[in-house]
Amino acid sequence: MIQTEDKPVKWKAGKSMSELNIVENAYLEIAGDKIADFGSMKNCPKKANEVIDASGKLVLPSFCDSHTHLVYAGSREIEYVDKIKGLSYEEIAKRGGGILNSAKLLRDTSEDCLFEQAMARINEIISMGTGAVEIKSGYGLDTESELKMLRVIKRIKEAAPVTVKATFLGAHSVPAEYRGNQTEYVDKVIYEMLPQVAAENLADYIDVFCDKGFFTVEETDRILIAGMKYGLRPKIHANELANSGGIQVGVKYNALSVDHLEYTGDDEIIALLKSETMPTLLPGAAFFLGMIDPPVRKMINAGLPVCLASDFNPGSSPSGNMKLIMSFGCVKLRMLPEEVINATTINGAYAMGIEDTHGSIAKGKVANVYITKPVSGYEFLPYAYGSSLVDTVILNGKIVSKY
């Protein structure tokens, strides 16, 4: 049994990221939707209503995927071909592709159709071991479409066994009709979208794409202040394309996480060390777009916690496979297997604001775990990057899938 805690922590940082608590030949007792107990089999209670034999297998806490955009319409494989031909992310965006393409598709798609598409993706990530997921809006880019996305996310919360957090990302890009008048769109996000999002209680967090070619530090500052007035804690897209200042503005407003971070220097690391903000890396997007990798070893060696998330979206990371994200962490970012497990479980839970209830195997936490197929050890999970190794998924104390 991997990632057990007698005294739960909020995150793993620095050297502790390479530490895992393991109980060999273990039992796990579930009562209702909570973890009641765990320990060595020699102390296992003899009576149980139902027993699952996991001999030769591993039991791990479900993945906590803290950054996705999995509510979207259609796909963008044509842009994928454009990338192969050499066009950059920014070049595709400037000619109406990228986020703007997804926005057009989403506006023309009904709420019911969006929900059906999203639930198919939810069921897929559950089957791969994810038990908690954050989902952002941001492909609407007008008031009604942003509200439509958030209503779909609310329906997912009610319908799916996975734990869901919703993030309002009206400032994901500037719509074509506001190009040249970006301030007017920022005003629309603040004065028109936000009040309606808050009135329907549709979001847990607020996010801004603070980066080169998107929203400035000053615009981000305005949007975050407005969101905080409605009780929405910030999360930031930052430093994916340049040293944008997004990390610093996130820290300034006590953002729960700052995400992407390909361009992270000494000043950004120092700012993060003085904060309660989780640095979140999205190696799937960097891989798919052929971007530089963030300085992960420097961040961990400095004492920072690091989270890994999928960035599941149609344009730059069309996969919610968190086991693959662990493999990217090891192969691309030179992280240890122990570090990627911590980065996708307890640190992911912190980046969603649910570390008290998710992200590890501890008494009283939600019983979200998965059982692997027979494997030689936890190192095999990121090593076998193309293999499906999930045998049984348990969410809220109930078996939801078995293979």
Image (spheres, grey):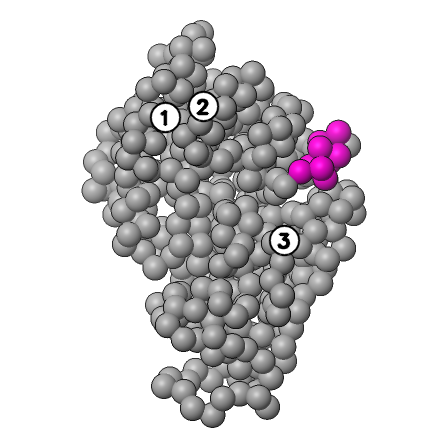
- Residue extending furthest top? 180
Which label sits on residue 194?
1
Residue 204 lies, with reference to residue 43, above or below; the image says above
* Residue at left offset 47%, top offset 29%: 228
The residue where tag 2 is placed is: 226
The residue where tag 3 is placed is: 11
**What type is the residue that disc 3 sits on?**
Trp
* Residue at left offset 71%, top offset 45%: 304
Find numbered disc 1 in the image and state the secondary structure of the residue it sits on: helix
User: Residue 125's image quarter?
Assistant: bottom left
Find numbered disc 2 in the image and state the secondary structure of the residue it sits on: helix
Residue 97 shown left or right of residue 348 in the figure = left
- Label pair 2/3, CB-CB below 8 angstroms: no
Q: Start and end of the magenta stretch?
A: 267-275
Residue 35 locus on image (x, y percent): 47, 71
**What type is the residue that disc 1 sits on?**
Leu
CA gap, disc 2 and disc 3? 28 Å
* Residue at left offset 51%, top offset 77%: 37
Does residue 76 appear in this view?
A: no
Q: Please state which of residues 51 and 127 is positioned toward the viewer in this rendering.
A: 51
**What type is the residue that disc 2 sits on?**
Ala
